[in-house]
Amino acid sequence: MIMKQTTLFAIVFALFLMPCLAQEKQTQTKTVKTVTVLSSNVCGAVKFQSDEAHKYFNQGFQLSRERRFEESAKALEQAIALNPEKCDAFVILSYVYRELGRYSDAANRAQKAIKLAPNSSMAYHNYGSALMHLNRYAEAAKSFETAIELHPQRKQSQVSLSWAYLELNRFQEAADMAKEAIELFPTSGMAHNNYGYAQIHLKQYSEAETYLKKAIELDPKIRQSYVNLSFLYLQMERFEDAAEQARITIQYFPQHAMAYNNLGYALTRMGKYDEAIVALKKALEIDPTLEKARVNLALVYQSTGQNVPQ
């Protein structure tokens, strides 16, 4: 039995997409990266107990700036072994482990930094960042809130807190925090992205479009902004614009499964079923776990009277 087209569209509309938030879990490199500013002195003046500990710390810090994270981690662990009361080493090591994808280790080192220096804003920020990667969003939000209380001008914590609020579906708070971040950091593409995404859920579509376009202008490397803009156009039922934006995303990020899924959905709504099938198949080729693309593909087959491939 062929599914009625209107029924198909109603179901697909509910299922087509889990749009990208401030940081994508697929990359979390999730792209997750939260904004981080490295400094070798984030916990106050605690002297090194030996020249050797100081040497390892400086070495680890410099290696982290050069993004040689495996080497940096080894040097910082040596510094900590020689001087376990030096908070700065724990803070930088938590960042390094996060970059290595060792999120539990990152959280552990950040917690130790907080115990050593409970007034260290950066320690709370790094702890929150690690928790975001562990999907512990409520705890992460509290950690970012503490970081901001300790350092109200820490713009990277405001950007990250807006992301945490998005993950918690606290969209008005996310918008408010992202707006504060934009005021402090007007060139932040991620802050603009977070604000724009929150505005989609608040149904302020014109505002969302303005800020997502600005996010792309400020930082063309943030692929979430491209996908969120196509998501916005889908919400507005501007399907040709959504398809065009998805194609732009694919041009810059050819391995972005969600972009192909969005393209497939837009093409479905435009009645271009053969092209939609190609796009949705490509989404699943890139990411076989993308269930929404799988559901959308099955619905397209059913709506055109074709058997769903097993």
Image (cartoon, grey):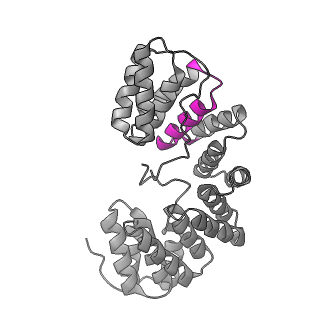
Q: Does the magenta stretch include residue 135?
A: yes
**Vertical relation: 159 (above or below) 227:** above
Q: Locate residue 56: give its quadrant.
A: top left
**Image height of 280 relative to 57, above or below:** below
Q: Return the x and y of residue 290 as percentages of the image width and height.
A: 39, 62
Whether residue 103 appears in this view of the structure is no
Residue ranking furthest to the top: 49
Judge left or right: residue 203 versus residue 74.
right
In depth, the one of 76 and 22 nearer the eye is 76
- Residue 292: x and y in percent read 43, 65
**Where is residue 80, by image quadrant?**
top left
In the image, what residue occupies the spot 48% across and 76% down?
248
Q: Would residue 75 be counted in the magenta stretch?
A: no
Q: Of residues 30 and 279, which is closer to you in this image?
A: 30
Determine whether 299 is above or below 36 in the image: below
Of the 4 image quadrants, the one containing the N terminus is: bottom left
Q: Which residue is drawn at 45% across and 20% down?
A: 54
Describe residue 35's horizontal placement relative to residue 286 as left or right. Answer: right
Tell me residue 146's x, y (percent): 67, 33
Viewer-nearest residue: 183 or 277: 183
Left or right side of 154 for 108:
left
Q: How many labels does the image show?
A: 0
Q: Give the range drawn in magenta.
A: 116-137
Please name the predominant secondary structure of the magenta segment in the image.
helix
User: Which quadrant of the rendered structure holds the C terminus?
Assistant: bottom left
> In the image, what residue occupies the spot 44% across and 35% down?
62
Residue furthest toward the bottom? 271
The x and y percentages for residue 279 are 38, 77
Residue 21 in sight here: yes
Front residue of 214 and 52: 52
Q: Which residue is drawn at 34% across and 28% down?
A: 74
